[in-house]
Structure formats: C-alpha cells, structure tokens
Image: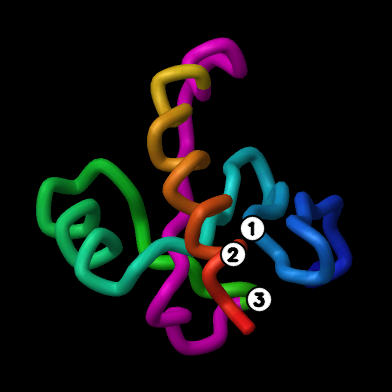
Amino acid sequence: MFGHPGYYVGRKLVACHYGRGLAIRLPEKLVESLLLRRRAKPFRPYGKAPMRHWVLLHHARAEDFRTDRKLLMIAVRLANSMP
C-alpha cells in the first residue's frame, strides 16, 4: 500500500511500513487518544492530509515495536469486523 509493504487480513489493509515507521489502521477514538498522548503521529502519506483512522508509529529500535502488539491486535479485529 502506498508503494510500501503492507499487512492484510483477507483483503483489508491493517498496517504498512512507511519510511522508518509503521502506519496502522485503528478505530478513530483510539487514534485521537494516541495522538493526544503523543504516542503516535498523524499518518500523512506523501504529505497529504492526515488519514482519520490511521496513525504512524515510530521507535528508535526495531525491537521496540513489540510494545505495539495490543494495537496490532486491535487493528486485526477492526479489519475482521469490516464488510
């Protein structure tokens, strides 16, 4: 997706690598919370407007993405609930 490797559940995109981060699709309320707590940044692919259901996660070390396991599971459940 967006010219970068992505992770899918069926045909629904859950997350994708973007630059040195991971863009992930989450429920809008959770996105707002993550942005307010500055745990994530708005996902603006190629400088466009931020995508409402997406955030960009970034960590200095790749192994630190393990801390986002719960968010990834929420993203998978979200994808499974979509028609």
Q: Tell me how far mark 1 sits from mark 2, CA to CA.
A: 6 Å
Rendered image: mark on residue 82: none
| Closer mark to the observer between disc 2 and disc 3 | 2
Q: Amino acid at mark 1?
A: Val
- On the image, numbered disc 3 is attached to which residue? 46
Mark closer to the chain start, 1 or 2? 1
Element assignment for label 1: strand
Instruction: Name which of mark 2 and mark 3 comes first in the sequence.
Output: 3
Q: Residue at x 82, y 62 (%)?
A: 10
Mark 1 and 2 residues: CB-CB less than 8 Å, in contact? yes
In terms of depth relative to the viewer, which is nearer, 53 or 12? Answer: 12
Residue 22 vertical placement versus 16 (above, below) = above
Q: Residues within 10 Å of mark 3 (few under 14, many from 20)?
A: few
* Colour pattern of the rendering: rainbow
Disc 3 from disc 1: Cα separation: 19 Å
Judged left or right of residue 70, residue 62 is right
Element under disc 3:
helix
Q: Of marks 3 and 1, which one's residue comes earlier in the chain?
A: 1
Q: Residue at (46%, 67%) from the top-left corner?
A: 54
Q: Residue at x 74, y 56 (%)?
A: 9
Residue 62: percent from left, percent from top: 61, 18
Q: Quadrant of the rendered structure where residue 1 is?
A: bottom right
Q: Is residue 57 left or right of residue 30?
A: right
Q: Is residue 77 above or below residue 79?
A: above
Magenta stretch: includes residue 60: yes
Residue located beneath label 1 in the image: 14
Query: Looking at the picture, which amino acid does disc 3 mark?
Result: Tyr
Left or right placement of residue 31 versus residue 29 in this view: right
Magenta run includes residue 6:
no
Q: Residue at x 25, y 42 (%)?
A: 39
